[in-house]
Amino acid sequence: MPPDDAIQFLREAKVARFGTIGPDGYPYVVPKLYVYLDGMIFFHGSSAPGHFATNVRHNAKVCLEIDEPGTVYLHGNTACDTGIAYRSVVAFGTVDVVQDPEEKTRALDALVAKYADPAWQLPKGDYGELGRLTVYRMTIEQMTGKVNAVP
């Protein structure tokens, strides 16, 4: 997939899976709503401790994966001769916690713009106690996109 197409897909996709490694050496993958903004990925979580927060405090390196599965197809004469049409992006980078309240609010505004139904009529910029939310920022160091169309 050309880099511009990968970025466009990253902008449009709904859910990203973030992979981390815990202090115990085990991998952990969690789905998150996210937004691509200023060349970085922003997402949020609770300020409560959990696997993700523990893992990124231990090791800030993460892997992100998004995909859009398509049609499963047969391309030969046996059951093993199957494939699936898809688009996917995998990105590697590091995550840190956004501390600046203005940057946090800007990221949350972008998340609301991406996901909220306009009929909800939410007050703009009202996130309750901003300190209760942890906003993460992923700096992308490497990214690849793949596409497999039905032959």
Image (cartoon, rainbow, N blue to C red):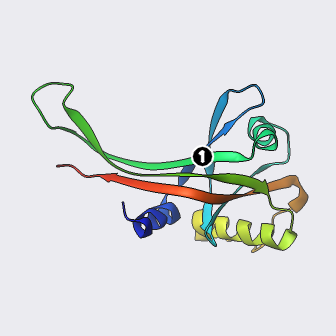
Is 7 positioned to the left or the right of 124 in the image? left
Going 65% across and 33% down the picture, which residue do you hit?
Answer: 28
Label 1 neighbour load within 10 Å: few <14, some 14-19, many 20+: many
Examine the rendered structure and indicate whether residue 25 appears above or below residue 74: above
Q: Is residue 46 left or right of residue 27?
A: right
**Image location of residue 101, percent across then percent down:** 86, 69
Q: Position of residue 76 (x, y in %)?
A: 11, 33
Residue 106 sits in quarter = bottom right
In this view of the protein, can residue 9 be seen by the observer? yes
Residue under label 1, please give it: 63
**SS for tag 1?**
strand
Q: Nearer the viewer, residue 26 or 99?
A: 26
Q: Position of residue 68 (x, y in %)?
A: 40, 50
Which quadrant, please, contains the N terminus? bottom left
Q: Position of residue 144 (x, y in %)?
A: 46, 55
Left or right of residue 27, residue 127 in this image: right
User: Picture quarter containing residue 72?
Assistant: top left
